[in-house]
Amino acid sequence: MAKCRAWVMVEPGKVVMEEFEIPKVAEDSALVKVKACGICGTDKHVYLGHFPMAKFPFIAGHEIIGTIVELGSKANDNMAVFGGSLEVGDRVFIAPSSMGCDYCYYCLHMPDNPAFCTQRNIVYGFTSVKRAPGIWGGYSEYLYLLPRSYVFKLSKDMSLKRAVLIEPAATGLRAVEQAFNSGYGVGRSAMVLGAGPIGLLTIVSLRHSGAGLIIAQDLFPSRLNRAKRMGADLLIDGNLPFEERLKQVREVTDGVGPDIVVEAAGPPGAFREALNFTRRGGTLIEAGNFTDTGTTEIKPFDICFQGLSILGCRYSPLSFPDVISMLESTSLPVEEVVTHTFPLEEFPEALEVVGSAEASKVAITP
C-alpha cells in the first residue's frame, strides 16, 4: 500500500513528520494531492497551546488547494460540489468544515451557516489522526476526502498564490457582509486594525465592496505598505500614542470616527482600542481572535453610551463562491499577500516565520 508523509501536531510545541498509508478510496470518497496549504495564525496559536479544544495528535492545515487524483464512483452524489461534477485531475479548494447533519439545533435554526453544526462529519485540519486513515489536514502530501465535504472546483487560470488565499479571504469578506447589515454601505468609512493576512484580505473585501475611506493600522511599516497596495487610503502607525492615532482617524472621519471598525490584529488590547476608534452608533467587528490569546479590560458603559454594535466574525462555507469570484475578478495585487512559501519538509521553519514582521501569508507547497 502506498504511503504519504505528513506533519503531526503531537502536543503543544511538538510537530513530527510521520508516514501514513494511503487507503483504497471508498465509492463515496476521494483522494486529493495537496498542492498548497496556507499556514493560518490559528495553527501557530494551536502549536503554542492557545487552543484548548485541539484534538492532539492531528495533522493541521485547513487552507487547502489540491488536485483530485482518485475519485469514488459515487463521490459526486455524496459531496457538495460547486462548479460542476468532479473529475480526476480537477483543481479544487476544500472547505475546512463538512456539511451539517441537518438535525441539530443549529442546522434547523441557522441553516445558512453549517459550520455551527455540532455533528459535522469532519473538520479538515483539526481532526485527530486516531480516526483512520488519519490524513485529514493540509500539511501532508495527500488528503482523504470524505462524503458530505464541500468541494469547490477552481479555474486553472487562477494562480496558486491567489487560490491559497480563499479560506482566509472568507473571514475578510464575512466581516464586510456583516457590516452591510450594520450601517455600512458604498462610500462609507472603515478602519482595519492589523495588516496581517486577515486584515489585508478585509481591506481587499472593503475596496471590492465600494468603501469610500479605508484606514489601516499596524505596528510594522512593511505591513502598512502592503495595506496600501491592497487599497487602504490612510495608514496609521500603531506605535504612536493612542491619542495621536485617534486624532488622525477623527480628522478624516468628520471628527467622529469610522462607521465600521474591524479588529484583525489579535492581541486582546487591540479590541479595547477598536472600541474607542468606532464612532457613536457604529459597528465593531471582531475578526482577529479564533484562539484564546487572553483578556482585556473594557467598560460596558462605553458600549451602551456610544450605542455600539459588536459582532463576532465566523464565515459560512456557503460564502466561498463569492470569495472565489472576488479573488478572480479583483485587479488588486492580492498575490503579494503571500510572502513566503516552503516545501513540506520545512514546515517547522515555516511555522517560525508566521507572525514575524516581514511575513504575511506563509504557505506550504508539498
Image: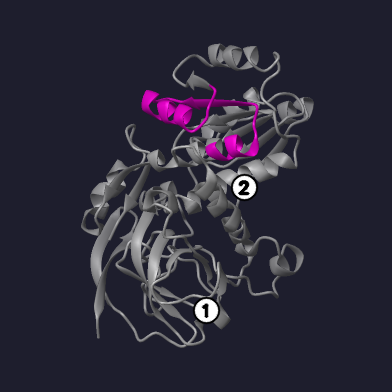
Residue 286 sits above or below residue 76 on the image: above
Q: Amino acid at mark 2?
A: Arg
Q: Position of residue 302 (x, y in %)?
A: 72, 26
Residue 308 sits above or below residue 30 on the image: above
The image quadrant that residue 245 belongs to is top right
Identify the residue under disc 1: 147
- Res. 175 visible in picture: yes
Residue 108 sits above or below residue 327 on the image: below
Q: Position of residue 111 (x, y in %)?
A: 71, 65
Q: Are marks 1 and 2 in contact (CB under 8 Å)?
A: no
Image-based side of 261 in relation to 335, left or right: right
Q: Which residues are magenta?
A: 204-233
Q: For the residues marked 1 and 2, what is the alpha-carbon distance in whole angstroms?
A: 26 Å
Q: Quadrant of the N terminus?
A: bottom left
Q: Position of residue 36 (x, y in %)?
A: 35, 58
Q: Position of residue 15 (x, y in %)?
A: 28, 58
**Element type where label 2 sits in the image:** helix
Q: Quadrant of the C terminus?
A: bottom left
Identify which residue is drawn at 51% across, 50% down.
328
The single residue placed furthest to the left in the displayed view is 345
In the depicted view, which residue is nearer to us: 267 or 335? Answer: 335
Mark 1 or mark 2: which comes first in sequence?
A: 1
**Element type where label 1 sits in the image:** loop
Identify the residue under disc 2: 174
- The chosen color scheme is one colour
105 drawn magenta: no
In the depicted view, which residue is nearer to us: 260 or 290? Answer: 260
